Amino acid sequence: MTGLAIPLGERDGIMLRAYEVENGLRCGCICPACRRPLVAANQGEKRLPYFRHAELDECSRGRSEGIRRAALQLIAQHQRLQLPSFAERVSIFLKSGRSVIRDVGFDAVSIVPDNVERFVDLDDLRAHARLSLHGHNLIVRIKCSSRQEHERKRRLQAMDVSSIEIDLHRLSDADINDEMVFQHAVLDNPLNRTWIRSLKGEALVARAHAELELEAALLNAEWQQAEIERIEAAALVAARPSEQQRERLEALALHHEAQRALARTTGRGGEGIEHTRTQREALIVATMFQAVREWDGLGAECSGCRLVSPPGSRFCHYCASDTARLRERRYSPDLEQTIDQNKRCWSSPDESLLWASRLILLPYVA
């Protein structure tokens, strides 16, 4: 039904359906919104019984107000009401980046109130119903249109009392005219009602939050202690390379002294000698040939001077570089026959002069 059709009329304070009264003006019903006479149309065969205003009227709230008053009439008559379930997730972020979580709530439950009051004024806000149970109050709002009422809900949430909303705006005229369907929608359907504010739910949330705060404090303390230990361990690990580096530099200094002593003893000192590219090339080739002849083709090439030391050497036998590293290499047995071909595009002598312009010890050149 649309337009002027109203599914419920009021007579002597009782909400009635059109099929429950006499036809026409004899119904004796008034509009639940504007309080003007209604006409019952209950003898048609092609549409459900309904009411309309006896005179053309601009009243547009007859339908919604009728549904609301009929719903409140049922609650007061049966003295029971299904409350919605409550569910909320409480979480606290930890210093570790994780979070602790707890789900709290309670199931839907049917209550039998001690008292039901209809249309109660709460300061400047009207509650559709106020139910009392064991000294506690519950405010009930009946939603009968799709219009959102954010301000009313905000004001109810600010009150220190629990409140729910029962949403009936999706009921069809057939649903409203079916007494059992309408009764279930008002009293028993847990799916069409929600909490506006639940003091019990808030208490559960507050308790869970307090418990999680304690748990989070313990977990944060454990994490912080673990972080301290991790940082200290990392600092020890970071310090080890420095100690190893100092040990290496000390060993390298001793190695250089030994090389200088050998250079003086053998007369192959080279610290004050500058080489041409051809001279440095000859020295590099000499150490490569030595690897083939004396060390079974194995040698340790220096990344600085490019000369080849005996395999297994820790430091270069010839240059004074502190940063150079040795790389184990294998040289072909026919190196002496192919060396001229290899030297055609050879950059090793240039790099040798660049990174180690002077040598501590000159290799023996046959």
Image: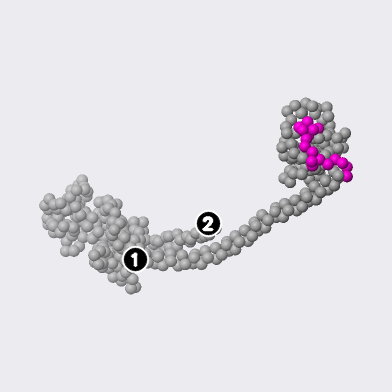
Residue located at (30% from left, 68% from top): 131
What colour scheme has been applied to the protein in the rendered image? one colour
Q: Residue furthest bottom?
A: 135
User: Looking at numbered disc 2 in the image, what kind of residue is underneath it?
Assistant: Gly
- Secondary element under disc 1, as helix, strand or loop, is strand
Mark 1 surroundings: few (<14), some (14-19) or many (≥20) residues within 10 A = many
Q: Residue at x 57, y 62 (%)?
A: 224
**Front in this rendered view, residue 65 or 126:** 126
Find residue 325 and report its horizontal and vertical position in percent. 74, 43
Quick check: 208 above or below 275? Answer: below
Q: Is residue 123 magenta?
A: no
The image shows residue 351 at horizontal and vertical percentages of: 72, 36
Q: Is residue 195 left or right of residue 97?
A: left
Going by the numbered disc 1, the residue's amino acid type is Ser
- Residue 172 appears in view: yes
Residues in magenta, as a range: 265-282
Membership of 273 in magenta stretch:
yes
Which corner quadrant holds the C terminus? top right
* Few, some or many residues within 10 Å of mark 2 (<14, 14–19, 20+): few
Q: Is residue 171 left or right of residue 364?
A: left
Please state if 210 lies on the left or on the right of 146 as rendered: right
Kindly identify which numbered label has been placed on residue 162. Answer: 1
CB within 8 Å, label 2 to label 1: no
**Nearest the eye: 187 or 195:** 195
Q: Earlier in the sequence, mark 2 or mark 1?
A: 2
Give the label on residue 97, or none. 2
Residue at 12% x, 50% y: name it.
Answer: 56
Q: Position of residue 254 (x, y in %)?
A: 80, 50
